[in-house]
Image: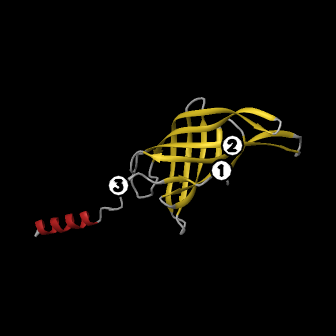
Amino acid sequence: MIRKLALALLALALSTIPTHAQTAPLAITINSSTSSPHSCGRVSYPLYCYGIPISVNGTAGTVWLDAYYQSNSGFALFNVQNPDGTYAFLSTANITGVTTVLSTVTFGPHTSLQITSIKVGLSFIGDPDSDGDDDSSTAVMTLNFTYSYGCSGGRGYSCFWVRNATDGTISTSAALN
């Protein structure tokens, strides 16, 4: 009797193991383009860009990048929600390395040396796919930028460069499970 009960409990336990583990890397795409760039606001250090439109496995969301490119550190915060409000993918990733490409940019009479491309190594933290377990995965995010130059009156007249994310890629190296 005890043996049958133990076998029944084992069968029940095995049948409740989640089968939703992902066997392929996440498909993360950046939904910004040269025809519809995403404004990152004024040029700053660290390189700061909030609300970059992305999709993870087809579900729309955003990523916030805060890259200290002089010290190879910072973070990226991914926020992707399902239509019902539950999180499809929510994660912070530590920056493990940063490579920048600097180019001279010109806007009207203004010229400056700016970051036109950045490649960021990422290491995900926690449970980004919200399936109740801890995951580990790495990724590489590449973003390309254009610039504009503008002035505002406000409290004092100031002029500044504005960074625009035009396109990029995010490739994950391991599946989350």
Report the number of discs.
3
Rendered residue at 60%/48% (across/down)? 167
Name the N-terminal-most of marks 2 and 3.
Answer: 3
Residue 121 in the image: x percent, y percent?
50, 38
Indicate left or right for 164 with 9 as reference. right
Residue 62 in the image: x percent, y percent?
59, 54
Amino acid of disc 2: Thr
Report, in whole angstroms, how far the alpha carbon at label 2 lies from the one at label 3.
36 Å
Q: Nearer the viewer, mark 2 or mark 3?
A: 2
Q: Quadrant of residue 14?
A: bottom left
Q: Say the numbered circle drawn on residue 34.
A: 1
Closer to us: 149 or 12: 149
Is the residue under label 3 in contact with that under label 1 (CB below 8 Å)?
A: no
Rendered residue at 20%/66% (across/down)? 11
Disc 1 is placed on an element classified as loop
- Give neighbour class at mark 3: few <14, some 14-19, many 20+ (Cα, 10 Å): few
Q: Quadrant of residue 111?
A: top right
What residue would you read off at disc 3?
A: 23
Examine the rendered structure and indicate whether residue 41 appears above or below residue 81. Answer: above
Name the N-terminal-most of marks 2 and 1.
Answer: 1
Examine the rendered structure and indicate whether residue 83 appears above or below residue 37. Answer: below
Disc 3 is placed on an element classified as loop
Q: Nearer the viewer, mark 1 or mark 3?
A: 1
Residue 115 in the image: x percent, y percent?
65, 35
What residue would you read off at disc 2?
A: 146
Report, in whole angstroms, how far the alpha carbon at label 1 lies from the one at label 3.
33 Å
Residue 67 in the image: x percent, y percent?
60, 38
Q: Say the numbered circle drawn on residue 80.
A: none
Examine the rendered structure and indicate whether residue 21 appears above or below residue 47. Answer: below
